[in-house]
Image (cartoon, rainbow, N blue to C red):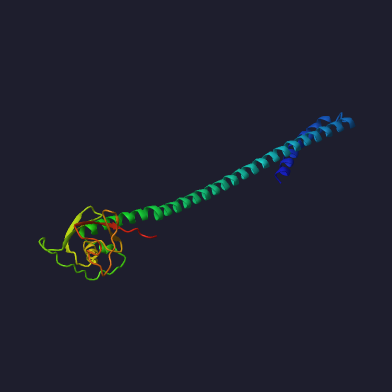
Amino acid sequence: MASRGIVGLFLLSALPLLCLELRRGIPDLGVKDLILLCGRIFLLLALLTLIISVTTSWLNSFKSSQVYLKEEEENNEKRQKLVRKKQQEAQSEKASRYIENVLKPHQEMKLRKLEERFYQMTGETWKLSNGHKLGVLGLPEEPPETAEEIVTVALRCPSGSVLRRRFLKSCSSRVLLDWMMKIGYHTSRYSLSTSFPRRPLEVEGGWSLQDTGITMDTVLIVEEKEQSN
């Protein structure tokens, strides 16, 4: 529609020129002159049509390129937004995994160590056990130093402290476990072992201290058991 309008405009502008030529050439106008005039007019129209066609094509291509560039920019912007969104989601997921798998266990382990240290210092390590019932721990009275058939037992605790107590050799070997639990080390998490040679202390219900081999002053070590996964 635009090209037709432009062609019509050029035809209207060429019409006065044609009339002027006709007025000038009417007295001497011949067939040959008329043919040359028509040829000039058609040549001018062909040239104008070519110019209009090229201009129109260029304008259309320019508009198409502008539209294409605009669409391409919009698509690029959409792709960039999508990429940024995916990156943000990946970062958020990575941060969540880091918090869940690294920070949270580290904080829990740190808190558990502080709690264990607190209960060990206060002698309440039994509170760290997983619901084990301690029952009533009754230790026999400590015999005097002048009593016969006695033995002094020293417990070397994980905290570095060493506790000593006297027992009769005839006491049940279970009294050592009761003593260990009373000072805060539950049997579910800790065990007793001899210092030299280093081996777990065998304690049976019917055995006395003498039956377990404790016949003289002895040092026992309180050790933490390996926790199964």
In the image, residue 87 lies at what x, y percent?
Answer: 49, 49
Q: Quadrant of the C terminus?
A: bottom left
- Residue 155 in view, yes or no: no
Residue furthest to the top in view is: 28
- Residue 72 in view, yes or no: yes
Q: Please tell me which residue lies in front, 126 or 58.
A: 126
Counting the numbered discs, the total is 0
State left or right for residue 68 relative to residue 87: right
- Quarter of image, res 169: bottom left
In the image, residue 55 lies at what x, y percent?
Answer: 70, 38
State left or right for residue 149 relative to residue 30: left
- Quarter of image, res 10: top right
Q: Is residue 70 above or below residue 153?
A: above
Residue furthest to the left in view is: 146
Q: Please tell me which residue lies in front, 120 or 193.
A: 193
- Residue, x 81% and y 30% (percent of image)? 24
State left or right for residue 106 relative to residue 38: left
In the image, residue 189 lies at what x, y percent?
Answer: 30, 61
In the image, residue 79 lies at what x, y percent?
Answer: 55, 48
